[in-house]
Amino acid sequence: MNIFFKSFFLASVVAVTSIAQAQKQSIIKPTELWPDENGNHIQAHGGGITKVGKTYYWYGEERAKGLDTNFRFVSCYSSTDLTNWKFRGDVVKMSDPDSLGAKWILERPKVFYNKKTKKYVMYMHIDNRTYKVAQVGIAVSDKPDGDFKFVKRFRPLGHESRDVGQFIDDDGTPYLVFEDRPFGFRIATLSDDYMNVEKEVCLIPAHMEGGAIVHYNGLYYSIGSALTGWRANPNKYATATSLSGPWSEFKDIAPPETNTYGGQSTMLLKVVGTKTTTVIFLADIWKPKTQWDSRYIWMPLEIGDGKLWVPRPKPWSINVKTGEWKAE
Ligand code: DGJ
């Protein structure tokens, strides 16, 4: 290599390395654009996090601009620090599953990893354009990043089901939380292979959606939002010593006049570290007319002794090994 090519080669290596370094993030910035490792705003709306080994997978609604409107897409991102996310692809690209009609709906995918079968099982809300079908759909994959194959859609235990949430208890038991519009939140166990909703554990008679649950220091906390479509509202929480209840009354998780800072709940993520445990509130700031620009609120909760509060969104960082977080 002559001297010209040598220096050109070295300069290119330096440039490529510094681009990669520039993309490395250490701070989570709620409400702002959240670039993935390619610099594109993360498209994982109404999503959920699945941890397998040391890797977190973030699945959600892929709503990038200009997608083929004949299909619905679920994206998958992976991370080991909850801050830098690598796009793993659209793991679901689905056309209308048997005649739901134009503008059919696939929302709020949640993936459970079954250690026995080694399958990744996705639950999602499937509906027609008027939200009257109210079913869950199931898709399954051998790998976290797909492809997920659609298996079936149905009403769990015969009930209407719109927003779905997932909860995995400390003993590893998976639960589906689903919104049964006439009655409230239902919490149900899954079959051994996770391919069916098996048994109802509780009906929380609250007319809410965006349901999520966490088990923290011996108490269950459930959160949800009011039924205001894409518009934000004051999300609320209740507590219980057992999943089957009785549940307390629902109380505000943030100053009600902020409408949960513009966000709607989708998950409560517990990070158990060597020093402490942090519970993160995951929410969507929906932009119904420009869904690709919808944002996220991820904030560590003030939680304990039956109280739960989402602090005003601000930049923060987390060390997933120790579980510690700090404001930035
Ligand atoms: C609120 C739900 O939580 C969202 O997932 C979506 O279904 C919108 N309603 C549609 O209005």
Image: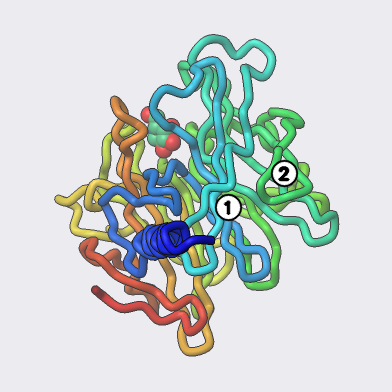
Whole-percent x and y of residue 129?
A: 48, 16
User: Does 320 appear above or below 281?
Assistant: below
Rendering coords of residue 169 (x, y %): 63, 66
- Residue furthest to the right in view is 117
Which x, y percent locates residue 94? Answer: 63, 25
| In-image side of 135 versus 173 (left or right) | left
In the image, 294 versus 41, the foreground residue is 41
Judged from the image, the secondary structure of the residue bearing numbered disc 1 is strand
Q: Which residue is mark 2?
A: 197
| Disc 2 to disc 1: CB gap under 8 Å | no
| Amino acid at circle 2 | Val
What is the number of the mark on residue 166? Answer: 1
Q: How many marks?
A: 2
Q: Quadrant of ligand 1?
A: top left
Instruction: Looking at the picture, tell me which residue is in the foreground, 177 or 24.
Output: 24
The CA distance from mark 2 to mark 1 is 12 Å
**Mark 2, other Cα within 10 Å: few <14 / some 14–19 / many ≥20:** some
Give the side of residue 318 with respect to residue 73, left or right: left
Closer to the camera: disc 2 or disc 1? Answer: 1
Residue 118 pos. (x, y %): 81, 56
* Mark 1 burial class by Cα count in 10 Å: few <14, some 14-19, many 20+: many
Left or right side of 207 for 54: right
Instruction: Indicate if the residue with disc 2 has its beta carbon within 8 Å of ligand 1.
Output: no
Which residue is painted at 33% across and 63% down in the image?
Answer: 28
Residue extending furthest toward the front: 2
Instruction: Tell me the amino acid under the disc marked 1.
Output: Gln
Residue found at x 69% / y 72% = 171
Q: Residue furthest bottom?
A: 275
The residue nearer to you, when weighing 231 against 217, is 231
Is residue 87 shown above or below 250? above
- Residue at x 74% of width, y 33% of height: 149
